[in-house]
Image (cartoon, helix red, strand yellow):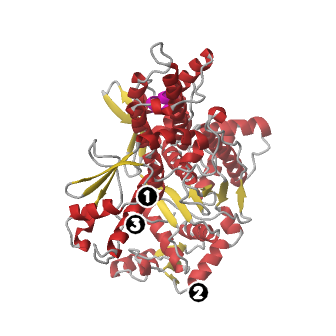
Amino acid sequence: MCVRVLAIATRGFMLSQWHWQVAPTSIRAPLLDCAHCPSAKENSTLEQLNRRLEAAIESALLSAQKAGDLPQFEIPRIPVSPPKRAGQGDWAYPAMGLARLARKSPLDIARLIVDRLPTLDFAGKIEIAPPGFINCTIADDYLRKQIDAMLTGCQDFFQLDIGVGKRAQVEFVSANPSGPITIGHTRNAVVGDALARLLEAAGYAVQREYYYNNAGNQMIILGKSLQLRYLQQLGEDVPLPDDHYQGEYLVDVARDLAEKHGESLRNAGWQRFRDEAERVMFAWIKRSLAAINIQHDAFFNETSLFESGQIWSVLEAMRENGHIYQATHWEGADADEIADVTAKGYEPATWFRSSKFGDEKDRVMVKSDGVPTYTLPDIAYHRDKLERGFDIAVNVLGTDHFSQAQVVRHGIRALGMDPAPIDVIFLQMVRAVRWNKRLGDFEAVKQSKRAGDFDTLDDLVAMTSADAVRYHMLARSPNSQLDFDVDQVVKQSNENPVYYIQNAYVRCAGIFREAAGRGFDDDDADLTLLTESELRFVRKALELGNVIEQAVTQYEPQKIAFFAHELAGVFHPIYDEVRVLHSEVPAETAKARLRFYRACKSIFRYLLELMGMSAPERM
């Protein structure tokens, strides 16, 4: 639960003896049947054209400095980005950012750069525009070549090398095994898994980890709740206290226990019922996640930190570093706080001097009765993460964990370790909303595992679909509250982005079914017959590499959902306009267009894969 206040958490791959690892239950299928792909090339990785243009501009600036046409200065990186207006090319470089350093007008700087630019095979036209932009338009021939290149390597074409040779861990969901996956946990699951997929697309070796807390008081209450439900099944008139888990799901578990064991567990302790509840709940959690195409590679059990003694070794290390003390109150307490503690007769507890690292006050690590607070195992868990050697470690957490994440980060520093690899994505609240006819407005459903009044992931999938759940949970910034509108999600129209994106793939699949039925293929397709309509789609598709890079480096996996919708918006009008198997379309033109749609199909399938969604052949 640690931090850089922006996004996610973790780093490492060697699992200690205290972790158990799950073998993948399935292997992802290839994104495209490449029977019709051109022969493979060794290097089909997507070229980041903006990076190539930036490098060329830097080379031109260095050349101008060497010739004495520009003064010597350290050349800053000014990103190349798509222009804001149509008709201004595909990439724009603002030379205005160099005016102060170069002591020249932006237009003069732009001219010096353009005069010295090395040859770029993708550049069809490079123009200078006031007040100092260099606009680059991608050449049509280059775009046509990319259609075959996309098919040559299938998904490999879009593979980036940002994380090659690096290991990443994404810790997500991490819900206590005290009940089913709720809608809030679902958002966490989708965001975490999407980030993991994008990190893999960027070249990282990724581990998906689930940390579950089965050592706290809530598990004791869970065990006692199931014990009482079991006794009720035996006919005993025992009440269930209000602070126990009220959900009907425990009634089902208790009924199964009674049927299997009869009265033999009547005198069993709550621990027996806790273990049974945990087993059943965790199996349920895994089934629910699998239903939306999510599997974890490793599950980290909080109790292992106690069994291995890691929590006590962490406490001792912090003590040796001078950051632990015993007291009835924290060292910065004012007179009123001290008086309150004295009046209540508190015994000394074990405190962490977190205020020395910027915290608002010190934190209790071990209570006066010798029981650790959740802060100590949290710090021990993150030390374990860092010791596993991940290059980046990302936690996906709710905003209610923000303060705790900071405290854990302070604890890592108190151990003499660098918390830099650990990042956190904080998620705002999510709620399911339903239309209430009586009120004439939407209403939210309260979620509480104990009260048993909540929407579960299973509920959402049953009401909508796994694909709908994944997309709508992803397609919103984590910083925004999310209302999951069931009525909107199930619509089978272009108003529903899930339908809109998947229908692009379905339309391509339909073209190929019809072509196969006619015995028509795209062998020896002449792509010079493609027009600006088709190339408009390719231009947009080539932005995918940059989108993946931004999603990974900024920890914003929602960007892939936005892009998929935008690309579908470019595709559908082209589909309506550019026919393939039509009596008025010449055979050679039809072949070229069929090859184009093959590339479209490949790209949409890849996008759906990155979002963890299915690619249906029919809808």
Magenta residue check for 504: yes
Q: Position of residue 554 (x, y in %)?
A: 43, 57
Q: Amino acid at mark 2?
A: Glu
Q: Using the numbered discs, state the Cα–Cα distance from disc 3 to disc 1 in whole angstroms.
A: 12 Å
Give above or below for 515 relative to 446: above
| Residue 347 visible in the current orientation | no
Q: Using the numbered discs, state the Cα–Cα distance from disc 3 to disc 2 in whole angstroms.
A: 53 Å
Give above or below for 471 relative to 4: above
Number of other residues with Cα within 10 Å of mark 2, as a class: few under 14, some 14 to 19, many 20 or more: few
Q: Position of residue 559 (x, y in %)?
A: 43, 47
Magenta residues? 498-505
Residue at position x 35%, y 81% from top?
Answer: 334
Q: Secondary structure at mark 1?
A: helix
Residue placed most toward the observer, 271 or 577? 577
Q: Name the residue that disc number 2 marks.
A: 320
> Would you say 289 lies left or right of 271 here?
left
Q: Amino acid at mark 1?
A: Arg
Q: Quadrant of residue 391?
A: bottom right
Q: Name the residue that disc number 1 marks.
A: 51
Q: Name the residue that disc number 3 marks.
A: 59
Q: Position of residue 96 (x, y in %)?
A: 24, 63
Tell which tag, 2 or 1, sits nearer the viewer. Answer: 1
